[in-house]
Each structure stands twice: as C-alpha cells, then as structure tokens.
Image (tube, helix red, strand yellow):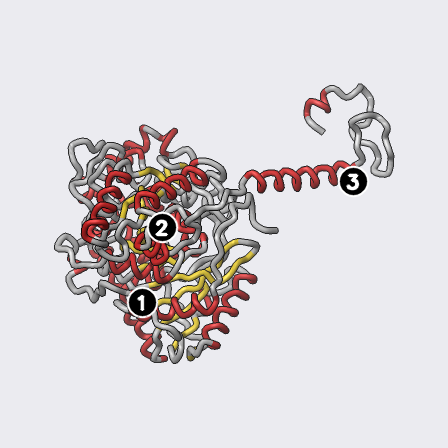
Amino acid sequence: MSAQGAETAPSGMREEPMEDERMTTPGWLTRRELVGAGLAGLAAGAAAQEREMRIPPFELQDMDIATLQRGLEEGRWSSTRLVQLYLERIEQVDRGGPRIRQVLEINPDALSDVAALDAERRDKGPRGPLHGIPVLIKDNISTRDRMATTAGSLALEGAIPPRDAFIVQRLRAAGAILLGKTNLSEWANFRSTRSSSGWSARGGQSRNPHALDRNTSGSSSGSGGAAAASLAAGCVGTETDGSIISPSAACGVVGLKPTVGLLSRSGIIPISETQDTAGPMCRTVRDAALLLGAMTGADPRDPATRGQKAHRDYTRFLQPGGLKGARIGLLRGSYAGYHPKADKIAQAAFDALKSEGAQLTDPANLPAASFSDAEFQVLLYEFKDGLNRYLASLGPGARVKSLEDVIAFNDRNADREMPYFGQEIFLMAQKKGPLTEERYLKALEKCRLLTRRQGIDALMDKHRLDALVALTQGPAWLIDLVNGDSGTGGSCTSPAAVAGYPHITVPAGFVHGLPVGISFIGRAWSEPVLLRLAHGFEQATRARRAPRFRPTADL
C-alpha cells in the first residue's frame, strides 16, 4: 500500500487483513494477492521496458569491415552514407532509447572528411581496407582537431594537444574516418579505489548493451560497448591492466592488448610507461587484425617502438585450421572459479580447442608469487611522472599543468567531479618521487622478474607452448555508484599486462544473457600466433551475439 493510502486509512482498521480473509472493502488485498500483484506489476513493467527498448533494424548491424568495404566497392553505399547511418545509430541507442552513453563526442568534421575520401576513391581508388571506414577512439587518445581530448575529466576541457597521437596519424593515413570519441572510466580508472567503471564527469555512467543495469567494465568501457552495439565499424581502446580485455569480455567483443611497444603511446594520456598500450576492440578477430596493422609503426616520440616486430597486415595469419597442432596451456588455479556457470563455458571452450586439433597441457599454471603490490607502486610512480609531462605539453588553454593542479581542480569542483567517489589514487601518486627512487626500481624489477622470466616465459618454455588460455573473467556486475565496482572474483589480465605481453579475448558464451570471454596470452611480439589461434576458436564456436538492450540480465 502506498504511503498516501496508509495515511488515509480509517482509524482503528487493521493495516492488513489476515491472509485467508477476503475483504470486500475497495483497495484491500490479501498478502498473497498483494505479493502476486507486485510481482505481476514488476513483470509487466519489465516487459513494457523491454518493448520500449526494442530498436528498429539497423542496416549495418554487426557488419564486419570487409563486408562494408565490398559494399563501398560495389556502390551499395558511399562512405558518407556509412557515416550517416552510424550517426543515426548513435542517436538512436546511445543518446536516446536505451541511452547506453558510450560516445562522448561526435567529430564535427566527420562528414567533410568523409566527403574528401569518397572523392579520392572515385579519382584514385581506395588506399586500403580501412579507406572510408568509420571508427571510434577512446577519449584519452589525442586528436589535433575540433574534438576534445579529456580522459573524461572536466579539468581538460579546452586543452589542445600539440598534435595527433601517432596511432591517430596512422589511422588517418589508412583512410579511416574518426567518427568520434568514446566514454571511459575517468582518467582510465586510475583516480579512486572506489570507482564505478564506465563513469566519467563528462559522459556519466555508461551501461552494458546486453543488460542495461550491468557495468561495461573499464577503463575502455565506451569502446567496448560501442563495438558491441554497432556504433562504428571498429573501436580503439587503451590498457594498463585489463582496460581493453575486461570491457571487451564484459560486452562480448574481441579485444586485443598488444605487446607494449607495438603501438606508439605518444599523444595518449598516460598511466604507465612500462604497461600502457592502445589496441583494437572489434566484433571479429579479423577486424581487430585489420585495425592493429593500420596502427603499427616505429615512432621517434616513443622509444618503446624502436625494437618492435610489427606487421602491416595481420590478416594474413588468419588461416583455416589455425588451432591444429597448436600447443596450448590451460591456466586454472587462481585464474578460474570466478563463477560456476562461467567455468562451464570455459571448459566447453577448452573442449572446442581440443576438438579443433590443439594439444592441451592441463593445467599449466603460473607460479603463485604475488606482484600486485609491486605493480601498484610502479603505476603510482609512473603515473605522476608521465601525466606531469603530458600536461606540460598542452597549449595555453589548458586549465591544469600538473597532477597537483588536477587534484586542486577536482577539490574545487567536487560536486561535478567527485559526486560518487574521490581521488585517493591521485593523492597517493602525488606523494611519489622521481623514477630514480630505489623503491620504484625494486618494484619494477620484481614485476618483470615474476611475470616474465619466472612467469609467462618460464611456463611456456617448460611445456613448449604456443599460448596460454584461460577464462577472461566472470560475467558483468551490477552498476553501483554507491560502493563502486564489485566484479566476480578476478580476471586473468595482470600477468600479460605487467609483463607487457600480448593478450586477446574472444567471446565464448553467455551466463544469463551476459557475455563471457576466453583469453589467449603469449610471449612478446607473438600477435601473429595469438590472432591465428583466436580466429580458429572464433570460427569453430561463433559464440558472439548482438546485444538486445535488455533492462537486466536474463533471469
């Protein structure tokens, strides 16, 4: 009964009849009828909401880049038309309808840029497989244009980067259209210990397109959700530890974190010089391979790229029967048990690997030595150093020039910047000294020793493995702006992230309508091997499904 009804009930009347009574007084129900009516009302409300969230058919739904390119070549549409269709899609499901909040900003020059590329196609032919293909990039990747680069923070509004990020230069040279910037966990989820992934002051809370009350994970939340919802042909995210892999798994797409140094980090708002990298987030392994190849290249502004072992075309490694004869180690132990139904999906995935001809070592577990405390110390030191250098490079319009300035800005604007969680990590990082301090150097050496020489390399040498495979993580958790992220026990991202080694996740199944992914992890520069294996698994299982924008999980 409503509060208003309770206030107007006659004096002395029982607040509720006995459960077996049949009252004739209008408005009264038995407890059983009340509960039944409540459940029916909830069900009717959910059904009505689901009807409201039904999205009209989308012409480009789940189309891969090769299909789009064939349509361009055959004259089925122009690149201008592709941009228009994706902009309509963004308006329909990101800004309206389910309002998933994956896109922070639309490129105001997208239509003029694409018109020039359409003309170039007519006059000279396409530059390559990405000519005229719309992509979205994360809002910590700099563009020297009319779009902002803010890491989701109000503190960087109006700041102008000195140039395009190197990977943006490469995408433009390949003929890709930058459709806009995606939402993210503000400052790449390195601001608070109680953050809600996918929230930024500029973009608000992003929502998982498979279940709108579920988190997209972070920090490349917008890129993962946008790829899943077909808001662009492909997306680019960034990772320090899990920020490509986790949202890709949570949103049911392919995410590739490359070897650190394969893609330049210059022009990307940093956390860690030893762990940061950009990477593709797409609906298929082939599309991820296309985007990866377009972004590679040695960059004098990023010393880590000098010794890279890069390929311009990674699709040539995607051969039929890619799993046959592959030696794969199954990570269990602490990299399993996140969720019982997810574990069953992982086992089915392992069985699929075997049926496709892979030779499995089960288990092939990494040493139990912990490096998480050392990793956090490394990130605190490197974040302060790298962010201060990045902010100092910005033009005179920048409001902040140091981490100290950002902390002060957040304090002054706490009602907008910190309505749900604070900046504890910022405060810890600000106390750190230079990268010459012994504590930093010892922590970095511990991380490299435990994840490389005594970790991934030692395990793969011992069993002569091509890759390690594990359940990526459990299903997406509920959005919680009060308590922050909860998760379902952990993920397998840290060993490869801390080592700087490649890691790819591929959709493997669903738990109550929520996607679950399987991870392939390898040695430095083993992207060709991982892509071949991931593609083989993808083709054998075809587990991915387009999101349905349901109000909650399928329970």
* Disc 1 residue crowd, few under 14, some 14–19, many 20+, Cα 10 Å: many
Q: Nearer the viewer, mark 2 or mark 3?
A: 2
State the residue in front, 337 or 30.
30
For residue 69, above or below residue 525 = above
Q: Which residue is mark 1?
A: 450
Element type where label 1 sits in the image: helix
Query: Dots 2 and 1: beta carbons under 8 Å?
Result: no
Distance (Cα) linking label 2 and label 1: 53 Å
x, y percent for residue 379? 28, 52
State the residue in front, 253 or 238.
253
Q: Residue flagged by tag 2: what amino acid is it?
A: Arg
What residue is at 86 percent from the left and 38 percent from the top?
20
State the residue in front, 171 or 162.
171
Q: Which residue is mark 3?
A: 32
Element type where label 3 sits in the image: helix
Element type where label 2 sits in the image: loop
